[in-house]
Amino acid sequence: MADDSIQDPASVGKDENPEQNAINTPDGNKPKLPFLGFVGSYLHNIDAKGRMIIPAAFRDALGERFAVAPSPDFKAVALYPIADWIAKRDELVAAVRKKPVAQPVLDMFTKYSYTDCEADAQGRLLLPQRIRAWRLGDVRDVEVNGTYNHIRIIPAAAGKEQDRTFDEVYPDMLEFLTSIQD
């Protein structure tokens, strides 16, 4: 049975009349934009208690309650809206049904999943200690990135290294994009 209290992140901010999003509301406030995916990159710190501020730009679409779990590549901590966490879990369950050899992947995903997380009034999340230690170690400086349907948290130094590597692997982005188009 579906839980009507869980909002699909793709519907956050959607209006029946999309053109309404292009103008100010009658009271002069900015209208809500349709959900554009989690986008952007932010540098934050993990405090001594293991708390991290969730960027304000991500909070509405993430929802009041959300999941902390491994990222799809299992190399980072991820924050998922509950609907997206369920979809990822169900994808792994289906993979195990097709190929039982995938069972350890499902086991690790569920082992490091925490599905009843919420931010405090200041927008801080207490990152569960086990997944924090497993994927972030004892780093305090983290990069918080939007990756469309989830939020990815990695050590800030790893984020800098990814940027450097990207620039080396793709020195001419326009040429690369042209080469992969049909």
Image (cartoon, rainbow, N blue to C red):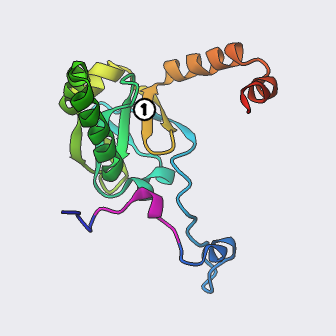
Question: Looking at the picture, how far across and down is residue 121, in whole percent?
Answer: 32, 57
Element at label 1: strand
Which residue is at the far front? 98
User: Where is residue 78, by image quadrant?
Assistant: top left
135 vs 91, nearest the viewer: 91
Q: Which residues are magenta?
A: 6-14
Establish if 80 lies above or below 170. below
Establish if 56 lies above or below 91. below
In the displayed structure image, the side of residue 114 where residue 38 appears, left or right: right
Q: What residue appears at the point 52 percent right and 59 percent down from the top-left corner?
A: 35
Question: Looking at the picture, how far across and down is residue 167, in whole percent?
Answer: 70, 18
Establish if 126 lies above or below 9. above
Magenta stretch: helix, strand or loop mostly? loop
User: Where is residue 171, by image quadrant?
Assistant: top right
User: Where is residue 131, by image quadrant?
Assistant: top left
Which residue is at the far bottom? 26
In the displayed structure image, the side of residue 30 where residue 6 appears, left or right: left
Tell me the residue that label 1 is attached to: 153
Question: Looking at the picture, how far across and down is residue 125, in whole percent?
Answer: 31, 44
Q: What residue appears at the point 18 percent right and 29 percent down from the top-left corner?
A: 111
Establish if 136 lies above or below 32. above
**Residue 7 lies in the magenta stretch:** yes
